[in-house]
């Protein structure tokens, strides 16, 4: 009987376990995780914070599913991997034998380095425990300060605002998420936040946390302003949890380096999800993603390879459909470049690919609270952002991810004040009709 | 309401019930569970989204609550292809 050990209880780990069980009915699967809560929807925490969901709803599967899949769950901290003897050392000195091991340890919030950062009231949003803590603190807090960027910072801002906490949001630069959104998009988000009652402080950096009796009571900015608050939320990016791999002589860079089959530099040891730095076989680029869908796909691919069915991981253009200041937003492909002063490296719900925009033209259209921006390459669309009305979200996802030739509409898209949405909509209709005809012809020729 | 209009509304309802169902797009789904939470008859819509299958539960009213509530546009109505309702 083969023994599989999975470190991590997130979506990558769960998907791997599903894939393994499908291919190997009699094997042993151990799933080891630090968190006692096991597998829950990490992105769902945003809706738990705003009160749109209750805690019980965060769990996609129940005890029956774990029994059906024959997964033994163990709450423990993995300390060391001995790849030679195929043993995983745990915090209590015990060890687990494995034939194949998956590291799916995810990522953790980058810590704030400031005096007072351990005080009651300093929060982050990594886990269910963090969300519980925010809800508990928000029940008695009147004011909060949020520092950081990306999606998580807004999840916290919106969660606190929904719970009636007056929230101040510090931005180091002059706008929100400057290496993914363009200026118009940043302004749309900021405007909506202000309408919700959030005070945005531009060019503002935290200097000091003022603590009394172990609790946050205020923060001081670099320019010597003092803002009273009972909560200081930090979302300055995440770091892949790769210490275990580093301590076990597994090759790492920004994350754990894996080949196309998601195997690490050690035989029989695989990695998937936020912690894995995956390679794109076409461009040779290696990428970190902190998105749910790639984590799931990587977990499935790793599971298949662990069970002996050789499968390559093909990275799709990263897609996230999220809410930014209550505005549904689709981000797909390559849309920005450079750094964001509010983030160290990668954020949660993020992809390094989004910021690898080669030279491209932007075609854009604004209407009311909606915004559409396309990054137009030589023959294809390289990326797209759709804010508000999501009618074109699916078509654009398809056109970007399948590298569809847009030569017939390229010049129209790049005209000044082009009706971009209309051009895409009619192109999409024609494209779908053509596809349907091709399919029908294929079926007909099969009958002949 | 006369009998004709009653009949007509029944036909319309049948069109929706037989002619359409809720279809997920798994690549967009993060399993947050808002769809299942808001289903008035407690169908676990999220599970269908994980499997990438249409919500084939015979109790589904196709009321659209899950479609409207999903914050990520995972769900949409699609044609089942099971019914040709032209002419009632």
Image (cartoon, rainbow, N blue to C red):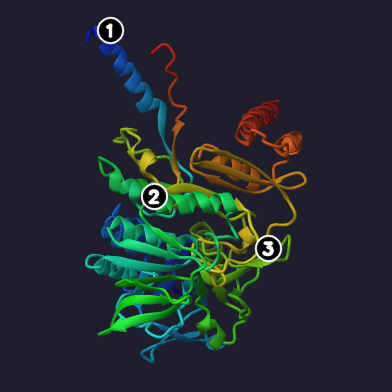
| A36 relative to A443 in the view: left or right | left
Residue A439: x and y in percent read 65, 31
Q: Is residue B57 shown to the viewer in this render? A: yes
Tell me which residue sits at (29%, 72%) in the image. Answer: A230
Query: Label 2: few (<14), some or many (≥20) within 10 Å?
Result: few
Chain to which mark 3 belongs: A
Q: Secondary structure at mark 1?
A: helix
Q: Quadrant of the C terminus of chain B?
A: top left
Q: Which residue, given by chain and number where applicable, does mark 3 sit on?
A: A280
Residue A210, labelled with which disc? none
Whether discs 3 and 2 lie on one chain: the answer is: yes
Distance CA(mark 3)–CA(mark 2): 42 Å
Chain to which mark 1 belongs: B
Residue A390: x and y in percent read 50, 40
From the viewer's side, name the closer residue of A46 and A172. A172
Q: Is residue A331 above or below residue A440?
A: below
Residue B4, labelled with which disc? 1
Q: Which residue, given by chain and number where applicable, does mark 2 sit on?
A: A195
Q: Quadrant of the N terminus of chain B?
A: top left
Q: Is residue A37 shown to the viewer in this render? A: no
Question: Do residues under tags 1 and 2 come within 8 Å of each other at their CB atoms?
Answer: no
């Amino acid at each position: 009987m083969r023994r599989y050990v999975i470190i991590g209880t997130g979506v990558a780990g769960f998907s791997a376990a599903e894939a393994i069980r499908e291919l190997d009915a009699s094997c042993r699967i151990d799933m080891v995780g630090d968190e006692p809560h096991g597998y829950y929807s990490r992105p769902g925490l945003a809706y738990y914070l705003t009160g749109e969901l209750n805690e019980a709803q965060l769990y996609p599967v129940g005890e029956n599913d774990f029994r059906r899949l024959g997964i033994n769950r163990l709450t423990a901290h993995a300390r060391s991997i001995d790849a030679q003897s195929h043993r995983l050392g745990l915090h209590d000195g015990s060890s687990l034998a494995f034939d194949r091991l998956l590291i799916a340890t995810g990522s953790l919030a980058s810590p704030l380095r400031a005096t007072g950062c351990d005080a009651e009231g300093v929060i982050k949003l990594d886990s269910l425990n963090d969300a519980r803590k925010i809800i508990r603190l928000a029940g008695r807090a009147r004011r909060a300060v949020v520092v950081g960027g990306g999606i998580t910072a807004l999840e916290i801002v919106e969660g606190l605002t929904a719970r009636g906490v007056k929230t101040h949001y510090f931005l180091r630069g002059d706008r929100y998420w400057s290496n993914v959104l363009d200026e118009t998009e940043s302004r749309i988000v900021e405007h909506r936040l202000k309408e919700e009652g959030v005070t945005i402080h531009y060019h503002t950096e935290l200097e000091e946390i003022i603590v009394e009796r172990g609790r946050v009571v205020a923060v001081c900015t670099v320019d010597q302003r003092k803002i009273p608050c009972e909560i200081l939320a930090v979302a300055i990016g995440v770091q892949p949890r790769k210490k275990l791999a580093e301590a076990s002589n597994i090759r790492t860079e920004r994350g754990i380096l894996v080949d196309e089959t998601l195997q690490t530099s050690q035989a029989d040891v695989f990695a998937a999800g936020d912690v894995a730095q995956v390679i794109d076989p076409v461009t040779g680029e290696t990428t970190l993603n902190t998105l749910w869908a790639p984590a799931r796909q990587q977990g499935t691919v790793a599971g298949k390879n662990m069970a002996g069915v050789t499968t390559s991981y093909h990275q799709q253009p990263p897609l996230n459909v999220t809410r930014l200041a209550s505005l549904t937003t689709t981000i797909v492909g390559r849309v920005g470049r450079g750094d964001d002063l509010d983030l160290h490296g990668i954020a949660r719900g993020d992809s390094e690919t989004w910021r690898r925009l080669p030279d491209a033209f932007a075609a854009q259209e604004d209407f009311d609270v909606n915004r559409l921006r396309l990054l137009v390459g030589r023959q294809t669309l390289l990326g797209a952002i759709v804010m508000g009305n999501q009618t074109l979200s699916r078509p654009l996802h398809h056109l970007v991810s399948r590298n569809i030739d847009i030569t017939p509409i390229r010049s129209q898209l790049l005209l000044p004040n082009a009706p971009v949405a209309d051009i895409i909509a009619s192109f999409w209709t024609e494209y779908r009709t053509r596809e349907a005809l091709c399919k029908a012809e294929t079926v007909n020729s099969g009958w002949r | 309401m006369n009998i004709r209009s009653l009949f007509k509304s029944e036909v319309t309802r049948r069109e929706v019930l037989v002619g359409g169902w809720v279809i997920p797009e798994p690549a967009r789904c993060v399993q947050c569970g808002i769809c299942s939470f808001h289903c008035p008859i407690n169908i676990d819509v999220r599970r269908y989204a994980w499997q990438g299958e249409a919500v084939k539960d015979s109790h589904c009213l196709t009321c659209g609550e899950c479609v409207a509530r999903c914050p990520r546009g995972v769900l949409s109505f699609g044609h089942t292809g099971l019914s040709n309702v032209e002419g009632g």
